[in-house]
Amino acid sequence: MEFQHVNVKLFVKNAEKIDLEALVPVFHGWIQNQGHDELLLDIADYNHVPSGPGVVLIGHLGNYSLDEAGGRLGVRYNRKAPLQGNNFDRLAQATQAALAAFQRLEAEPALAGKIQFNGHELEVFINDRLLAPNTEETRATADSDLRTFFSTLFGESDYTVEYAQDPRSLFSIRVKSAQAFDITSLLDNLKSLEPASH
Amino acid sequence: MKASNTLWKERLAGHLPEELAHEVDVYETELGLRKQGKFDERLIAETRLRRGVYGQRYDNGQRHDGKKVQEFAYPSGRLTKGPHTLWDAPGMQRIKIPAGGLNAAQLETLAELAEEYSDDIAHITTRQDVQLHYVHIDDTPTVMRRLAAAKITTREACGNTVRNVTACPFAGICQDEVFDVTPYARALSRFLLGHPDCQSFGRKFKPSFSGCVQHACGLANMHDLGLVGLTRIEKGEEVRGFAVYVGGGLGTVPYQAKMFDPFLPAEELGPLAQSIARVFARLGEKKNRNRARLKFLVHDLGIDKFKELVWEERKTLPPDTKWADYLNAAFASTEEPLHAAGDAPSSASEDFQKWFKTNVRPQRQEGYSTITVTLPLGDITAAQLRSLADIVRRFTRETIRTTVEQNFVIRWVSNRHLVEIHEALKAVDLGQPGAGTIVDIVSCPGTDTCKLGISSSRGLAAELRTRLTEQTIAMDAAVQNLHIKISGCFNSCGQHHVADLGFYGVSRKFSGYAVPHFQVVLGGEWDNNAGSYGLPVLAVPSKNIPRVVTRLTERYVSHRHSGESFQSFIKRIGKVEIKTLLEDLTRLPADGTDRSFFSDWGDPREYSLGDLGVGECAGEVVSAIEFDLAAAEREVFEAQLNLEKGNFEQSARTSYLAMVRAARALVKLELQDVSDDPEQVLHEFTTRFYDTQKFFDPFAGGKFAQYYFAAHAAASKPATADSARYQIDEAQLFIDAAHSCYNRFGAVTVA
């Protein structure tokens, strides 16, 4: 099974204190500076849509967003372009991108430290129903690759996983570590990995 | 772009209707040829447009980021998918939904596509279509195949074709309709789709159906072909037919449709539409797209001559059973309830009552209701679409439609399930009240994604929606039922002409900086199938528009007569009073220190910073030019007053002179001593600004100058109510374009 178009969402804490509108000028600043590895193009503001995609920074290879889907706020990376390498590489690329974006938002002066990682939780989606339909078979096949990756990400910490059950949904897994991590630690845990080629 | 694109083709092989499968295969081949440089870029543009694949803002590879213009270095480099349209730039996919009708499986397909290829949002348009944004062109064949598997086509969703056939979403259940127009709308959609007689138009062609005269749902008066269901008794039998209207349309200058036939028997509808298509294809303008809509042909020929030509064409049509076949097929599919009829709850929560009041409409079938699912700015998430599929399966036989007010309606809900369905909708954030009220604001995409957007229509809509929602509890009932419609530019995709409060985006210059504005359009009528069109009153900075809404609604509440509609109120108090009421809002703080005016709603970038002008010499010229342009706008206003008084000749004369004044203002940028002789102004404007294309809008080209030329040519001819009215709109657009030209000229001067 090939994972492509991996999405990673890292959940924030104190979501109720965050005003999504504040993200709009921040993302405009990111486009101005193009300080990412990826080409950043535009902003789609869906703050008016409850439990929606929030504020989306549209990129060519992938999108970044402060996403409210499922009623929970998180920083999400959506890899749009196919990526070479193996599943581990692709999971790592998307997770690193989401972590790096989160770290940048945590440090963003305009947001005054309001956006903080909750330390425990992330969700991984495979945004391609043909490659990864949300079935029991996919879960069985993918489980090994996913656990290998999460073990690397969380090191010695225990973690629990929960798969989305609606067969119409994207294949997705929510992971919660027993130990709390900060963004830097998680990035460090992934640093030893071979970077995936774009 | 998607890794699975080739796999989808294999997976769906044999599962698509043959015709649609072939259509997508051809399209995919043409994309491939274009990539190899073997297909002309203009051809590929028309090819994709005819399949609903649009360009999107910034698709020329450039974007002003608020500080500078950025050039995007896409992997495909300068490969284009049309003139000035880069291959890799995200685009929009429009999906036709005939009569707005969908089923649960189709909702789920749309959800999948929004999630996998777009940004998780499906957008409902003002013509009952669905749009997905930020789609890569390489993914579009797969999107089309997956839609085709769900029996949806994107064919002719754009381009110079027959666009989506719209219909009243309450057809079949409405208390007031004459009969259910749905089967006729579906049959006509099928009949005209890909029809050989509909492939050579100079511009698009939009049909619409309504089941009654008095309501707005079908908007017959603003369509190329508007059809209103009627019956009459012939030999003791009730016979169905349609009042046929032709040549309506909004666009830059709106035209009311003309009555073509007060009663056309229903069996003649297909052949008549075909005959109209043939005449339009044969005689409609082809070279000048700005005068290529059917409305211009009808206007130029006159309705009587147009009718004569169409009836002659009708006689020549070869026998064809397809219309009857499609009609029979459409009648074979009927809607039925899933559950037995019931009674509405006698008591329920306040929350429910509020929703019930605005979002529940009793059907003519006793014990059933149609409910409106209000979508903020027409947007719905993929997860909500799936939940909606569950809800329509649970409560109905999947009877759901899109509306031209960018919502959904769920039909055939048993009244005994109203509380349950409200709870189900609320659970997925789709249970908001306010359908059809002042908070249910219609907006085109505007500067968010549209290449033509001038001001942020969605940003303004979101802001007004937030503010008005907070006020609705205390709001007077007469205000609650007003309609607000917003377009990002003069092209009217937000249907601002038929709103109580309409707005369209323009720009103005202040202290050398461009400032986003909206023209305030008042006097439009939504009811009676868009019975009349509003006219622009004055341009106000975007950031002052909420205050415009407050002032106008407060004045309406305090000064209206008993039972007086907003439209009648506006007409009674007159434009002079309205202008006096709003005039101070047209001005910016004199010191320019409030920088918020220089950015648009929802977009913190400095608005059009490239238009920055500095320097004292330029400043002096600026003052003179702006003074003249302001005077020209005043003259257009005077023309409106003359029109209101029935002084058509004077109105036409004044609006023409307003154009002359605006043209002269521009000429003075290069020739200070230009006289005020109209002939000299015309000559100097033509040679200095038209022939050189300095005046040309990046997308509309020289269209607005042609309004001026036409007014000059008609200056000595008698004016009618229609011609005087059209010329007012044209004069305002010409002046708006003069402002834009002046803004560009200023930038050039400074550089």
Image: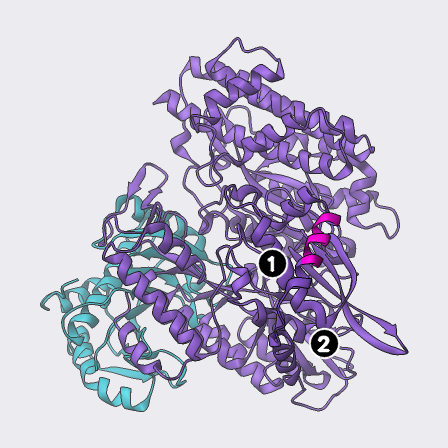
Horizontally, residue B489 falls left or right of residue B21, namely right
Amino acid carrying mark 2 in the image: Gly
Label 2 SS: loop
Residue at coordinates 41% horizontally, 41% vertically from top-left?
A: B605
Q: Are marks 2 and 1 in contact (CB under 8 Å)?
A: no
Residue at 57% x, 81% y is: B391
Residue at the far top in the pictured view: B673
Q: Which residues are magenta?
A: B304-312
Image side of residue B209 versus residue B453, left or right: right
Q: Label 2 crowding class (10 Å Cα cut-off): few <14, some 14-19, many 20+?
A: many
* Chain letter, disc 2 residue: B
In the rendered image, residue B694, in percent from the top left (x then y), is placed at 44, 27
Amino acid of disc 1: Ala
Kindly state the secondary structure of the residue where label 1 is placed. helix
Vertical relation: B182 (above or below) A78: below
Could you say where residue B432 lies in the image, as x and y percent from the top left? Answer: 61, 68
Colour that chain B carries in the picture? purple
Which quadrant of the figure has residue B44?
Answer: bottom left
| Colour assignment, chain A | cyan
Q: For this rendering, which residue is in front, B693 or B367?
A: B693
Q: Disc 1 sits on a residue from what chain? A: B
Task: Say which residue label 2 marks.
Answer: B172
Q: CA distance from mark 2 to mark 1?
A: 28 Å
Closer to us: B66 or B42: B42
Question: Relative to B713, is B148 above or below?
Answer: below
Residue B639 picture quarter:
top right
Q: Is residue B574 left or right of residue A154?
A: right
Judging by the rendered image, the residue that carries numbered circle 1 is B277
Residue at image position (43%, 43%) is B604
Work out whether B427 lies above or below B89. below
